[in-house]
Image (spheres, helix red, strand yellow):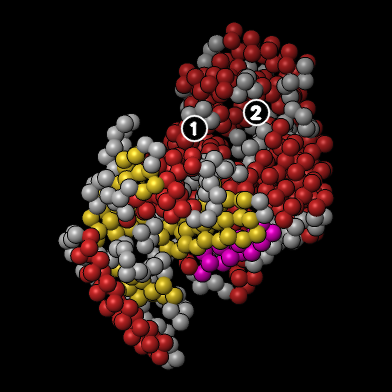
Amino acid sequence: MLELLNAKMTEEKPHIYEFGAYRLDTTNQLLFRDGEPVSLTPKLFETLRVLVERSGEQLSKDELMQEVWGDTIVEETNLTTNVSNLRKLLGEKKNEHKYILTIPGEGYRFIAPVRAMPVDSIQVVVTERTRTSLTVEEESAVPLVQAHRRLRLILGGVLLALLVGAGYLLLRRQTSPPASASRLPIIKSIAVLPFKPLVADGRDEWLEFGIADTLIMKLSDLKRLEVRPTSAVRAYNGLQQDAVAAGREQEVDAVLDGSIQRSGERIRVNVRLLSVATGQQLWADKFDEKFTDIFSVQESISTQVADAIMKVTGEEKQLLAKRYSQNTEAYSLYLQGRSLWNKRTADSLNTSIKFFNQAIEKDPNFALAYAGLADSYVVLVGQIDASLSESLPKAKGYALKAIELDPQLPEPHVTLATIAADYWDWDEAEMQFKRALGLNPNYATAHQWYGEYLLHRGRLDDALSELQRALALDPTSLIINSQLGQTLYVARRYDESIAQSRKTLELDRDFVPAHWTLGMVYSQKGMYQEAISEFEKAVRLSNEAPHLLALLGATYEKAGDRSSAQKILEKLKRLLSEKLAQPGDMAIIYIGLRDKESAFEWLEKAYLERSWVVRDVKAEPFFDPLRSDPRFENLVRRVDGKH
């Protein structure tokens, strides 16, 4: 049995058109500008295809809408928006009509000269996904009618060759594997972008992100494939986002791009897999199903994508077919909760908890919803409206429930590891981290948080290894980039830490942790004015976070500005009286002021509160002035669990 791969061979139209600096490949649904791929949404591509294929013709608005949207009912403004976006994409300026002419009250005409080109190649696949490529030598441009005649002759010969070749291959299959002149490029990593709306004014962001999030979760079960996490792709949700450019930024081999529309009880999905190296479409499909069949659509997409890039085992097929809930209402509520959770604000987290609880009401055995609740309560720790004692027990209970319902979920194990580390139960934390990574070795957040845990334990080489692995999986993550710089600082690799922190600030110049790290490094190098500058930025950007104020005060003292240091000390005392500062903040400022007795007094209070400040006592350079004191050695032993 032969399967034509994205080659809708007709006797009516060529597959390649050239106009100006552009080449339109209608077979692979690609547009190139000066040889570089240009990303288009499916509807934008269809609009351009129809206009180009019928260049010179006046197309009425109704006719163009029928060609692009078929029987789907859409507003005329969708067509107007599409044409406007095409003009911008093609570089037309206001009131310029280089490519598309508007006929007021009537429709549109494509007016640029168009050259119809012969077919470059047609690729076929036998059942084992082996592909044979038949190439026709490219000729110079010819008039459209003459091109059609030549194309019919070419395609007739190609079809005959395919039939003969197919018979030969099918006979050979009984004795040896089929030969292949060309194969799919090797795909070891993939990014799944947020889906876009089929209709520009019909955005449904929780569904757009939710479908992508679910596909990311499913494909992540394939341990041979690196899948960028949802946090890495959230920024690529623009209507005109270039999918291939996003893939390059994420340093992946392929990118999955799609569009979606929910209309009443139906859902329409277009999806395609693109090679980042070439821009070539490797696979594409369309779905028009009842929303109650959304799980089947997701299963079909993930399975077909996996089949397109690797030979999937029976066990892997079972993982891809896994359904986390049979209840579409519960699933919709979960997607809305997860979308809010990703915003990480106190308000969005509290609202996400409501959605997760509603999902559980619809499906009491929905493990992902319980995992969402656990994640929400863990992230709420440190927020104004949630204390450690209130949030962590709730998070632990929901994480255990999620594992009870689905032992294969890695997320709740990471949550349990984080909780154990917060309580300084180091052995339990390590066990849970390793369990999570055993379930999903490509889980970037697990590598990141495990790296932070190893930093607390003073295992700096292992910490750097985990963070570098996390960064490979999520190269544009601000927090992972920043944490790598912080760990290089603790490892006393100061110049490397500066370079990494500056790289983080190239992604976001206002990212507070990167300024914080630079302040720490410059202070250790004796570059006090540079350190003060970085801490002042961090204080301003964080709305005067007390621990950053304390570090700024400590640096003023090192720079010889005792007056400024004392002013910050007095401010911290006021904040402490208002319960806006913590014992750890006071310990920091007193270490900077070289007041050992006060420093140890506040370190002891910070220890009793299990403050983050004392978790890093093993290796943090800031504590060096205290290391020779027996009281500090005793503190290190107690934090380590050796009383």
Q: Secondary structure at mark 2?
A: helix
Q: What secondary structure is the stretch in magenta mostly built from?
A: helix
Quadrant of res 395? top right
The part of the chain drawn in magenta is: 291-307
Residue nearest the viewer, comparing 73 with 204: 73
**Residue 626 badge:** 2
Would you say 404 lies left or right of 119 here?
right
**Residue 119 badge:** none
Residue nearest the viewer, comparing 431 with 368: 368
Is-magenta flag for residue 296? yes
Quadrant of res 145? bottom left
Closer to us: mark 1 or mark 2?
1
Residue nearest the viewer, comparing 133 with 17: 17
Quadrant of res 490? top right
Q: Are marks 1 and 2 in contact (CB under 8 Å)?
A: no
Residue 249 visible to the viewer: no
Vertical order, 175 against 70 (above or below): below
Would you say 21 lies left or right of 387 here?
left
Residue drawn at x 29%, y 63% is 14
Residue 314 visible to the viewer: yes
**Residue 508 badge:** 1
Vertical order, 234 against 527 (above or below): below
In the rendered view of the protein, which quadrant contains the C terminus?
top right
Is-magenta flag for residue 447? no
Residue drawn at x 45%, y 43% is 79
Residue nearest the viewer, comparing 628 with 163: 163
Give the mark, 1 or 2, whose residue is nearer the N terminus. Answer: 1
Report x, y in % for residue 495.
44, 35
Report x, y in % for residue 29.
39, 57
Residue at the front extreme of this rendering: 105
